[in-house]
């Protein structure tokens, strides 16, 4: 199968491109100079260049993982967020429709308001952050412009990459550095390798739908840090619980509870959605860290 993956320089995009290349012909799109022969440089905000590139590659599937994920940056520069998260998605959706490509849009738990948690695929979306609004607008563009698509929301992706929350916490624990972690901020922490397997199944199913592709449990940042300590035999005493509170949560653009209900999607895909403990064990075994 011929697959185009955007966000080839990012943590998620680069991992997905490598994962999918095991069984498919994959082209990774980068904003900056590409790193390999199976990569292209492409500014997805450029409408004509995007249509031209997709037409030339003629992919069966497009996995759109590019975009700005820095929540604070999106608040500081909403127009940049719109360009990178909405305009790019609309351009790809149009290109996918013209080429009859199946478009997989990697969306976010931030499309929800965050007061209740355990959101289903059909729960009302009501984002209050600039990032969440642009991700929802991206979803809307896909549904309006694309004939064949899957909207895939995920939550709190973690992996052994240096630029990731897992590595930040793990390094603190490894160096015996105590730190404070929030007890009142929740998500559905998602192992990146498991997420890639979920995307592979969505490609295999090839059905227009919305999916929640995330970890199988609702967990706070503090609980996540404790599980890392337990998995890698570090001291729990280094994990200091702290409550963020509503005022600071608003100031830091952190919704309280963005956990996702994955029951419907897990049943449809027919594969295991990892618990945090299983996801951390997978990192421990595959990345060979201790």
Image (spheres, grey):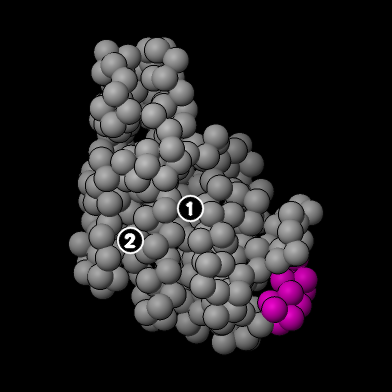
Magenta span covers which residues?
A: 43-57
Residue at left offset 56%, top offset 67%:
21
Residue 102's x, y, as percent?
A: 51, 79
Q: Main structural element of the magenta stretch: helix, strand or loop?
A: helix
Picture layout, residue 78 above or below residue 173? below
Q: On residue 41, which mark appears?
A: none
Does the image show residue 128? Answer: no
Q: Is residue 95 left or right of residue 166?
A: right
Q: Was residue 17 drawn as part of the magenta stretch in this picture?
A: no
Separation of disc 2 and disc 1 at Cα? Answer: 18 Å
The residue wearing badge 1 is: 133
- The answer to which of 201 and 130 lies nearer the viewer is 201
- The answer to which of 90 and 223 lies nearer the viewer is 223
Specify few, some or many for label 2: CA neighbours under 10 Å numbering under 14, 14-19, or 20 or more. many
Picture layout, residue 289 above or below residue 152? above
Q: Quadrant of the C terminus?
A: top left
Q: Is residue 40 left or right of residue 107?
A: right
Residue at left offset 34%, top offset 23%:
181
> Tags 2 and 1 in contact by the CB under 8 Å rule?
no
Mark nearer the viewer, 2 or 1: 2
Residue at left offset 74%, top offset 74%:
53
**Quadrant of the rendered image containing residue 6:** bottom right
Q: Was residue 52 drawn as part of the magenta stretch in this picture?
A: yes
Residue 96's x, y, as percent?
A: 59, 79
Q: Is residue 150 left or right of residue 241?
A: right
Specify few, some or many for label 1: CA neighbours under 10 Å numbering under 14, 14-19, or 20 or more. many
Residue 272's x, y, as percent?
A: 25, 60
Please tell me which of labels 2 and 1 falls first in the chain. 1
Q: On residue 212, which mark appears?
A: 2
Residue 177's x, y, as percent?
A: 41, 12
Residue at left offset 35%, top offset 59%:
213
């Amino acid at each position: 199968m011929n697959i185009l993956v955007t966000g080839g320089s990012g943590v998620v995009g680069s991992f997905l491109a490598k994962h999918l290349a095991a069984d498919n012909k994959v082209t990774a799109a980068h904003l900056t100079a590409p790193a390999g022969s199976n990569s292209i440089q492409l500014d997805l905000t450029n409408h004509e260049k995007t249509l031209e590139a997709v037409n030339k590659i003629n992919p069966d599937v497009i996995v759109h993982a590019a975009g700005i994920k820095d929540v604070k940056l999106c608040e500081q520069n909403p127009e940049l967020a719109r360009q990178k998260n909405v305009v790019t998605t609309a351009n790809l959706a149009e290109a996918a429709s013209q080429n009859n490509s199946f478009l997989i849009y990697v969306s976010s738990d931030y499309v929800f308001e965050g007061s209740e948690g355990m959101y289903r695929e059909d729960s009302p979306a009501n984002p209050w952050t600039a990032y969440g609004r642009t991700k929802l607008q991206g979803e809307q563009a896909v549904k309006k412009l694309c004939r064949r698509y899957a909207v895939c929301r995920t939550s709190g992706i973690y992996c052994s990459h240096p630029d990731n929350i897992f590595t930040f916490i793990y390094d603190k624990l490894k160096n015996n550095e105590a730190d404070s972690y929030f007890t009142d901020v929740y998500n559905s922490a998602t192992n990146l390798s498991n997420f890639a397997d979920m995307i592979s199944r969505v490609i295999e199913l090839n059905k227009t739908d919305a999916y929640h592709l995330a970890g199988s449990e609702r967990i706070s940042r503090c609980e996540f840090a404790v599980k890392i300590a337990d998995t890698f035999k570090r001291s729990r005493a280094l994990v200091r619980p702290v409550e963020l509170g509503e005022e600071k949560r608003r100031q830091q653009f952190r919704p309280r509870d963005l956990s996702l209900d994955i029951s419907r999607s897990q049943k449809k895909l027919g594969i295991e959605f990892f618990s945090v403990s299983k996801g951390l064990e997978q990192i421990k075994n595959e990345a060979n860290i201790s």
